[in-house]
Image (cartoon, rainbow, N blue to C red):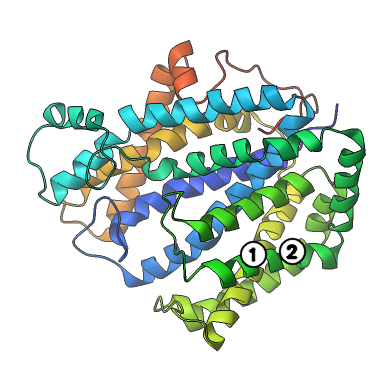
Amino acid sequence: MMERKYFIDWIRVLAFFLLIFFHCTMPFVTFGWEIKNTEQSASLSSIIFWLHQWRLPLLFFISGVGIHFSLNKRSVLSFALERVIRLLIPLLFAMFFVIPLQVYYEKLQTGQITSSYIKFYPTVWNMIPYPDGTLNWSHMWFVVYLFVYCILLLPVFGLFKINTLKRWKEFIANKLSSSIAATLLFIPLAICFFTLYLEWPEQLGLLDDWFVFTFSLTLLLLGYVLGGSARFWDTCEKYRTHFLIIAVVCIMVLFYNYWWKLDIPKQKDFRFYVYGIVNAIHIWLLIMAIAGYAKKYLNYSSRFLQYANQAVYPFYILHQTLIVAFGFYIVQWPLPIFIKIILLLISCFAALVIIYQWVIKPFVLTRILYGLKPKEKKLIPPGKSNDHS
């Protein structure tokens, strides 16, 4: 069995932890979210907007890599069943039992309701979608998209189980893994932006979200195709500094011209095409730089990694609801924004650890509802498993 690539686990864990930090800042930025602080920071908004450009593309790419390794040890039918259990069941559970608390606090802050949560909760069973009703997938949109991608791509996954096509996929992956070819893979991302961004701006509603849907699907497919190529990972490691330098230059250009004042192009002109190209280069090369540095310095296991790698999905499901609930009260306190963010981070992580350790982890039912396997994994000896799904 192939040696496990622990750096992929580290990327996944750290990316999801970054997501928790990201959402802890959302009450304090100038664009909309479930709850808002009275005082908001324009400079923080620009930084968070930058993080938004690449954090989920990174996760979709890593998810594609995970699909590659998952299919190495499963049939397509077994993979589909596993996706239902680990994606669809937690999604439905979250929509009916976790996310309604977010909607409650949002409507409470905006004055739409004044009742207790006990009286509010039954409205979720009216089955009226948010914002008119209570039923909402909120931050679980990532799981929605990932599940839809997996189901839609089942025929493709089945074809690449055929030995001839599997070898062809490996051949293409290696050809795309040279330094120049890998760098040029930003082009499909730029094409998505040019053709879909203005007509279909980000909605996260699946059926009316063609830019995000296609952009994220492209990254997932890149992860699926390239994930098994040792040459690709070696390229990321060898040229990691080059990729990072180019990404940083792109970031400077984007902040100076677009992000510092959040002046994103709204029409197809010269600024629009410059933005699309530079941002696509920035996103893709930053992903490869992160992969390269992780492979160089984080390709090892630890007890923390094995704990966090299992905890990260339940953390993801719960984190935004906890942030909204704690944040509803914290934003009312007369404190500086920085202190409020720190308090929100501490309270969120403390609650996540407590709930995971004593409510989710010990019981079969809660493990399944939060996307874990029914039985707790034993510590993985080095190099014994390569399933990053």
Q: Quadrant of residue 141?
A: top left
Q: Residue at x 62, y 37 (%)?
A: 150
Q: Give the residue number, with chain letter if any, for mark 1.
A: 189
- Residue 59 versus residue 306 in the image, above or below: below
Question: Is residue 347 at least partly visible in the picture?
Answer: no
Q: Viewer-proximal residue, 265 or 297?
A: 265
Q: Residue at x 81, y 38 (%)?
A: 160
Q: Residue at x 16, y 51 (%)?
A: 333
Where residue 275 sits in the image (x, y, percent)?
56, 78
Q: Give the residue number, with chain letter if any, for mark 2.
A: 185
- Number of residues whose C-alpha sits closer than 10 Å to that of mark 1, classed few (under 14), some (14–19) or many (20 or more): many
Give the side of residue 295 with respect to residue 88, left or right. right
- Which kind of residue does numbered mark 2 sit on? Leu
Q: What numbered label is drawn on residue 348?
A: none
Give the side of residue 119 with respect to residue 331, left or right. left
Q: Secondary structure at mark 2?
A: loop
Where residue 80 sits in the image (x, y, percent)?
63, 27
- Residue 354 versus residue 271 in the image, above or below: above
**Labels 2 & 1 near each other (Cβ < 8 A):** yes
- Residue 70 versus residue 234 in the image, above or below: above
Q: Secondary structure at mark 1?
A: helix
Which of the image's four quarters has the C terminus? Answer: top right
